[in-house]
Amino acid sequence: MRIPWKYVGLAGVAGVAATGAVVARRRRAQREDVAPDELRARLHERLAEVRGEAVGEAPHA
């Protein structure tokens, strides 16, 4: 029996598209609404941790 490779390829493309849709839906559900100031503060804290600085200090330019 010959395998119709065209159909196998189409099924693979459909599977990839379906997986992407599921991942996108999950990300939208996990996203939380954060005020811009709070988001900026969180990012500055993470940057300070990576640089090894104490949180609350002014960042070095």
Image (cartoon, helix red, strand yellow):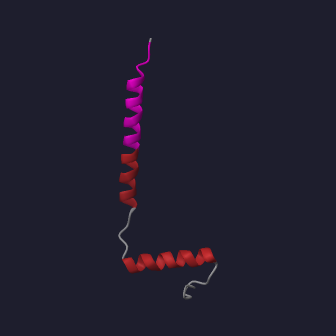
User: Residue 53's spot in the image, x, y percent?
Assistant: 62, 82
Q: How many marks?
A: 0
Q: Quadrant of the image for the N terminus?
A: top left
**Residue at left offset 59%, top offset 76%:** 49
Decide: is 7 above or below 60: above
Relative placement, left or right, of 8 versus 57 is left
User: Residue 5's spot in the image, x, y percent?
Assistant: 42, 23
In reply to whether residue 4 is colored magenta, the answer given is: yes
Q: Residue furthest top?
A: 1
User: Residue 25's spot in the image, x, y percent?
Assistant: 35, 52
In reply to whether residue 28 is colored magenta, the answer given is: no
Principal SS element in the magenta part? helix
Q: Quadrant of the image for the C terminus?
A: bottom right
**Residue at left offset 55%, top offset 76%:** 47
**Residue at left offset 40%, top offset 43%:** 19
Q: Which residues are magenta?
A: 2-19
